[in-house]
Image (cartoon, rainbow, N blue to C red):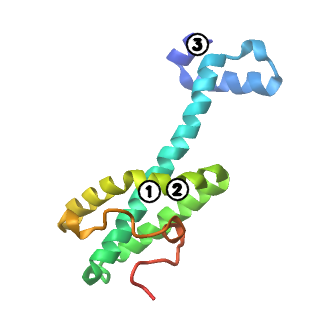
Amino acid sequence: MSDLYDTDFFAWTQRQAAALAAGKASELDWLNLAEEIESLGKSDVRQLENRLAVLVRHLLKWAYQPERRRTGRSWQRTGFEQRRRIRQLLRDSPSLRQRVLALIEEEYPSICRQTAMETGLPLETFPETCPWTPEQVLDETFWPGDS
């Protein structure tokens, strides 16, 4: 079965699913199956991390380039879309919610560097730590500086 894993991944997934559904443990490729399941969880974390990075980048642009808000409405559209997708991800995997703060903290320096490159603003423009709580970042009505 592990030969099939290496040569035709899709066929391998279909056979594994059929064996699981039929309760045929002897037909399961346990090692590769375990790795794939672990990979699924990691994929959700990477997706959350990427969506949070895009969202926080747009919040920074909104906060530190107020003169561009009129032309930067795409920042809001992107922000709404990222929040919607994050909400779906957290609905499907609620335990990921506890990772939001840590992911923002870990990625914030990179987010600032990328935002500085995209905007031309000096890196020092942005605070050393994220100025918003995870609740604010995820709140689709929150935009820094809006009343």
Residue at the limit of the structure toward the right, as seen here: 23
| Vertical comparison of 96 with 135: above or below | above
The residue that disc 2 covers is: 100
Q: How many residues crowd around disc 1 within 10 Å: few (fewer than 14), some, or many (20 or more)?
A: many
Q: Which mark is residue 2?
A: 3
User: Where the N terminus falls, by quadrant?
Assistant: top right
Mark 3 vs mark 1, CA separation in Å: 38 Å
Q: Amino acid at mark 1?
A: Ile
Disc 1 on helix, strand or loop? helix
Q: Residue at x 61, y 58 (%)?
A: 88
Q: Secondary structure at mark 2?
A: helix
Identity of the residue drawn at 40% across and 78% down = 144
Marked residue nearer the N-terminal end (3 or 2)? 3
In the displayed image of the protein, which residue is found farthest to the bottom? 147
Residue that numbered label 1 is attached to: 104
The amino acid at mark 3 is Ser
Dot 3 or dot 1: first in sequence order is: 3
Percent position of residue 121, x then y:
19, 68
The C terminus: image quadrant = bottom left
Judged from this view, the residue extending furthest toward the front is 128
Query: In the rendering, which numbered label is found on residue 143?
Result: none
Query: In the displayed structure, does residue 7 sit left or right of residue 20?
Result: left
Residue found at x 50% / y 71%: 136
CB within 8 Å, label 2 to label 1: yes
Q: Image quadrant of residue 10?
A: top right
Q: Is residue 10 above or below residue 41?
A: above
Tag 3 near tag 2, CB within 8 Å: no
Apparent side of residue 34 relative to residue 60 in the rendered image (left or right): right
Structural distance between the alpha carbons of marks 2 and 1: 6 Å
